[in-house]
């Protein structure tokens, strides 16, 4: 699973990244968490308000910082079935 945090590295972006890490840890799932700061790449996802959260190349949140429980739910909804 690949989780991307889209944003400039602002405090909200850092909070989202921490919460995503916590959610992954609590769910005990394997995931790579990456920061995307390039505005062209962020725009390519259609995200105009950061921070954005992308799970397996699907934008699941933008413009706010979801709580850990919401991120856990989003991860579960977007798990790849192998």
Image: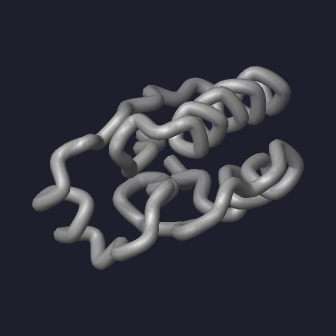
In depth, the one of 69 and 56 nearer the eye is 69
Residue furthest left as drawn: 40
Q: How many marks?
A: 0
Query: Which residue is located at x 42 percent, y 40 percent?
Result: 2
Image location (x, y in percent) of residue 29: 67, 28
How far from the left and from the top, in percent, is residue 13?
52, 42
Q: Residue furthest right?
A: 69
Quarter of the image for residue 78 reads bottom right
Residue 70 visible in this rendered orientation of the protein: yes
Q: Name the residue located 29 percent from the left edge and 78 percent from the top edge.
A: 46
User: In the figure, is residue 11 to the left or right of 75?
Assistant: left
Please give left or right for residue 38 compared with residue 64 in the image.
left
Horizontal side, residue 47 vs residue 74: left or right: left
Q: Position of residue 79 (x, y in %)?
A: 60, 53
What colouring does the structure picture have? one colour
Lateral position of residue 73 relative to residue 31, left or right: right
- Which residue is drawn at the image coordinates 78% and 47% (left, top)? 72
Whole-percent x, y for residue 36 in the image: 29, 42
Instruction: Identify which residue is drawn at 18% across, 69% down.
Output: 44
For the residue pair 82 and 64, the one nearer the viewer reads as 64
Can you see residue 1?
Answer: no
């Amino acid at each position: 699973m690949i989780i991307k945090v889209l944003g400039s590295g602002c405090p909200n972006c850092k909070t989202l990244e921490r919460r995503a890490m916590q959610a992954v840890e609590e769910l005990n799932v394997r995931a790579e968490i990456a920061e995307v700061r390039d505005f062209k790449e962020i725009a390519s996802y259609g995200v105009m308000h950061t921070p954005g959260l992308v799970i397996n190349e699907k934008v699941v949140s933008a413009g706010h910082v979801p709580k850990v429980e919401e991120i856990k739910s989003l991860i579960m909804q977007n798990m790849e079935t192998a």
